[in-house]
Image (cartoon, coloured by chain):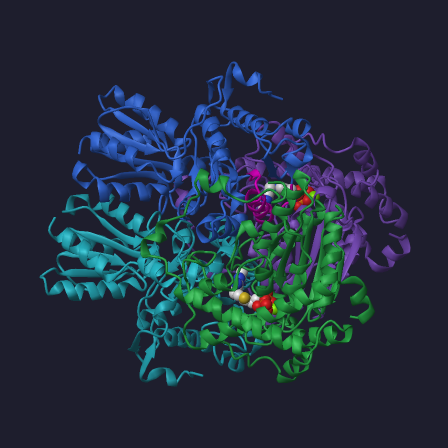
Chain colours: A purple, B green, C cyan, D blue
Amino acid sequence: MDLADVTSQIKRADLLHMYYYLRLTRALEDRITALYRQGRIVGGCYTSHGMEAIAVGYASALERDDVIAPFHRDMGAFLIRGITPGEVLAQYLGKRTGPTKGKDGNVHMGDLKRGIIGFVSHLADNLPVATGAALAFKMRGESRIVVAGTGDGGTSRGDFHEAMNFAAVRKLPVVFFCTNNQYAYSTPLRLQMAITDVVERAKAYGMPGEIVDGNDVAAVYLASKRGIAKARAGEGPTFFEFKTMRMHGHSEHDPAKYVPPELLEEWKKRDPILAAERLLIEAGYGDETYFHEILERVKKEVEAALEFAEKSPLPEGPEVLEGVFATDADLSHQATHSRSAA
Amino acid sequence: MDLADVTSQIKRADLLHMYYYLRLTRALEDRITALYRQGRIVGGCYTSHGMEAIAVGYASALERDDVIAPFHRDMGAFLIRGITPGEVLAQYLGKRTGPTKGKDGNVHMGDLKRGIIGFVSHLADNLPVATGAALAFKMRGESRIVVAGTGDGGTSRGDFHEAMNFAAVRKLPVVFFCTNNQYAYSTPLRLQMAITDVVERAKAYGMPGEIVDGNDVAAVYLASKRGIAKARAGEGPTFFEFKTMRMHGHSEHDPAKYVPPELLEEWKKRDPILAAERLLIEAGYGDETYFHEILERVKKEVEAALEFAEKSPLPEGPEVLEGVFATDADLSHQATHSRSAA
Amino acid sequence: MTTATSHATGEVTYLEAISQALDEEMMRDERVFLMGEDIGQYGGAFRITEGFLDKYGEWRILDTPLAESGFVGAAIGAAMMGLRPVVEMQFADFISCAFDQITEVAAKNHYRWGAAVPMVIRAPFGGGIHGGPFHSECPEGWFFHSPGLKLVAPSTPYDAKGLLKAAIRDPNPVIYFEHKFLYRRIKATLPTDDYIVPIGKADVKRPGNDISVITYGAMVHLALEAAQMLAKEGIDLEVVDLRTLAPLDKEAIFSSVHKTSKAIVLHEDNKTGGIGAEVAALLAEECFDSLDGPIVRIAAPDTPVPFSTPLEEFFLPKTSDIVAAARKLAAY
Amino acid sequence: MTTATSHATGEVTYLEAISQALDEEMMRDERVFLMGEDIGQYGGAFRITEGFLDKYGEWRILDTPLAESGFVGAAIGAAMMGLRPVVEMQFADFISCAFDQITEVAAKNHYRWGAAVPMVIRAPFGGGIHGGPFHSECPEGWFFHSPGLKLVAPSTPYDAKGLLKAAIRDPNPVIYFEHKFLYRRIKATLPTDDYIVPIGKADVKRPGNDISVITYGAMVHLALEAAQMLAKEGIDLEVVDLRTLAPLDKEAIFSSVHKTSKAIVLHEDNKTGGIGAEVAALLAEECFDSLDGPIVRIAAPDTPVPFSTPLEEFFLPKTSDIVAAARKLAAY
Ligand SMILES: Cc1ncc(C[n+]2csc(CCOP(=O)(O)OP(=O)(O)O)c2C)c(N)n1
Ligand SMILES: Cc1ncc(C[n+]2csc(CCOP(=O)(O)OP(=O)(O)O)c2C)c(N)n1
Ligand SMILES: [Mg+2]
Ligand SMILES: [Mg+2]
């Protein structure tokens, strides 16, 4: 984005806040990857490496009472919504202190108190769910909104279609985004859709759509702000296509030989953290010393988090049997109305 | 359509053929409706009254070996593909001589020998199925194509989306149409979608789309011919929105009080049979005497058909247990390759 | 339309009982709202919500696009945000389109990450109405095998009203199977006061000493009919109406069979893998010592529901099937 | 990649057996083709079709968009038009997205209007791999209750290859449940000639006289392990591997229990409403006079599959569960 546009529209503190979360996301996910390679992670390992700007950008654009339905490469959003690195690592290690208490793994973290709808593996399943959350806000006259995401792959599923359509018909306060990182697992876009821009999909619903540079945190943030403002004003949903590139394999076990190396080379230059640093320098908001400081800080935070996670207890076998059904007490503690109102 | 366009592009015999099937459809469905009111029909009763031009138009544009996946108001297509009025009535009366031998009812008629994929109640379910048939033709290098339809309501379902997308990605020889008759049961378009023309949906798939006057049999026929020719030439799928109006209730039990009478008045003037007659007169292809003759002929055919159906045996109870699984013999009799080739 | 006050008096049908429950719950709790196809101006395919649109407006009586997965998903989201959605399937058969949302999202959310999903899906099910393979299904067997869901299936107007209210107040996803055949065929006078029928409790609809007939839905009435016929022959059936299909009321099932020592398990759903299989398995596991004869299952054969009248008649379990099975079992 | 000739020699894993079956059937019959996510260049999430793209090209190894309902529907259409599609679910769990197409379209087409649908859906299922609630499911119980579908679940490389070939040659929709845990953990030398394992036939994996353990999938190996341990105590288990889950081989089940008079029904799927319920119900119905003790079911508890190691260990049935149950039953 243009420097003047950025500095006129985004406060210095907000940009620095985003930079911090970009760095924290990277450090945390790098640590998770390293643990995975050491065989210390339970289950699979998907990261947002090289795509951190998307989750950091949109999550920074939210108000406290808003709700997200993240997709599976939105680590930054979890962190910004308040899940601590320690809780994240506990989740990856199957510990009881993770958001799912060991019941579920890795990015399947949900917490209504922090306005996070837990990810479901079945891609796009949470998009209809997000419309329902938005419906609740609209019906109660609250000014809250929902941001809900999917990958390029997920847009092929019927639930994407049904959710987009319903949101448009009822002008629900929801912002949809697609993280278009060129691949769904090994499947390139050309085998997924006969369009070159996923944003074309929005036309089927009479929904406004926009293409945004997903590696530019400022662009993602400002676009999200626009969509969110419209949603909050009762003007209905918007669809954002965040263009980016998946820089690792689908999961860490995948060498991704199907990706042309040139493509990775090209996108490596557009790394969202480097881009953010360039922007901060140009704006005079930060310099190498500052960046180094942040880097050291997040590394320490991640190490402390790992210590927390490792020290945390594993759940015990019989806990399997707990929680299949909710009780009235569970329900009465459920965070549902605006936190400000409560 | 413009008279010159019609007469230059459609042969007299073809137009008269279509007129005959418009009349036959109307006569047959009127008879079914009357039987329904007398309580002589088993189950429900949906008709294409006032929308006959769509099925008659597209089915007339097919070659013998093509395949259709009709929707639930395509009586004319069944007839043109060779299901006799007697078989249709036998189906409605639950007789063993109907295409489903009493196992299923009303418009749920399928027959692979006649290139008809049997309708499934679950709307849009047959659209993915149609893409698979088209895939088989493409993989075998046959020049056959599939025409598959849905209502406006059916376009809201995920299976519509998944089928359209897959057909576009693989450039399959299939023509999709939507019979936009303004309502899905009682639900008006405005509560179904935030677009005014269903054809907008095609953009999401990079698929060419066209709006066609669904009450003009010549227009439907010529549009279908265009789409079919493209599909046959390997140029991939096309989507047609046939604009029309549902002139009865959703089913005969539905008084359709939710439809503004003005709307019906307006569309009554555009009755597809009257429109076809005007066209035939203008073209000098037919006159009142001729129309009267056809009317008498189809009435007689329908009465003979009813006699056949009424005389036909009902299935017997234990037949319930037959046919859950196919045998090798069933399969080896299944009409699958081009009939010409066989 | 029916109003809260009119609910008090006279006999009501099974259908009206459902309608009353919805109306009373909507008045009692403003979080309750309805979603589905054609439930607004049209009042629903079976006219259960007739007049509701005028009373509650187009947001609480929310006509949806034709997209079962989408609107069930939306109900899940609304439920998590504090509303109490009641979703109508136009026919239970179309619930297959929402299968993924129900089993993977609704059923598992609380277990996985602690988010309760208090919602109800109303599913008009069952045959006997010439509906054919796509308008007559009994889909309860599929959902029975999905931990996290509650399933109920009332057989009387009293239970229909009380179970629907209980379902709406339950903190979990509940599928409410309402039998279409019963809609206008049975009537009862209902209590004037607010009441619920607790989820998880079976009901002995007829006490008896010789054979337990364990059943639910429309079949309860066949069992009662059979019991009446057999009483003349000195065979005394106990008719246990499960009412709640998941979680099963094991205690009630076991205590009936402990008393009678013989069991017929009856349902309209296909035999193989139906809920009756679980009931029979539980008895064979837990009541083996009490059993004085084989456990007999009576159910529809393993086919889709056929359309034509003689076929559907053959397909559906009949009173005479129960009578014959009971005679044989009594003589065992 | 493996080629037809290389198929002949040496030990192969369960996974390789599947791969061989696909390869050989594709060579034998040009109508056979594969569809699914990432099966082409990538060779599938489990690398079962590695090298197939080069050999068969991008139409017979057809990478699909991420849309299970869409591509299962497409397989149905292709099957009706004379092809023999084999669809891969990346994980069995995602089959819920195609539930409607499978149960309403594929399962019912032949019954309704006489159109056979010869297709196979491969579903890598089961736990023990730290997959959590969405990558470890056993969905067979849902489809078991859907007339018109055949279900198979091999436990050995031999059966894996033979059943997959039989499934591909079957004129009906067959869901092929391949257990992920077994992929690379078991090996066997296979016949060099073409062979099939007929659908509908169970297999006694270990003959015994005291107790029948009726099971399938990965659990077969636990049962065999338990049998070995119990043999030392003089308890002689017969291990019946169902192999085909629908239609069940009732004869084989009954004849085993007629011999042993006692039955343990074992599966990894959730207990309530699982296939074991049907097996137990059949025994209680048809073999009541032969039974010398209650029918014991061993299965996973009624919860989603949990993620964390101690939880998953608790969740999955264990050899020690079988041993304990058998001891108790033997003493009955
Ligand atoms: C319904 C469903 N089918 C298959 C999968 C397996 N799967 C997990 S991620 C993935 C690819 C997702 O691609 P995309 O949506 O583009 O997200 P990305 O991983 O590229 O960020 C697949 C096929 C799934 N999770 N859900
Ligand atoms: C998946 C599914 N949901 C609900 C229904 C019940 N239903 C039958 S026809 C219909 C309306 C269909 O509208 P449309 O597609 O516009 O076709 P039309 O009847 O207007 O020609 C509905 C809701 C169904 N058949 N399938
Ligand atoms: Mg992607
Ligand atoms: Mg319509």
Q: Position of residue B336 (x, y in %)?
A: 57, 43
Q: Position of residue C288 (x, y in %)?
A: 19, 44
Is A240 placed above or below D126 here?
below
* Stretch in magenta: D64-89
Q: Position of residue A31 (x, y in %)?
A: 66, 34
Is B3 placed above or below A249 here?
below
Residue at the location (64% across, 39% down)?
A: A46
Is A117 placed above or below C43 here?
above
Residue at the location (58% across, 69% down)?
A: B24
Residue A12 quadrant? bottom right
* Magenta segment includes D72: yes
Residue at the location (82% across, 33% down)?
A: A262
User: Between residues D244 and B244, which one lies in front from this camera angle?
Assistant: B244
Residue C17 visible somewhere in the drawing: yes
Residue C248 quadrant? bottom left
User: Between residues C323 and C120, which one lies in front from this camera angle?
Assistant: C323
User: Between residues D172 and A184, which one lies in front from this camera angle?
Assistant: D172
* Magenta segment includes B242: no
User: Left or right: D316 with respect to D52?
Assistant: left
Q: Residue furthest left?
A: C234
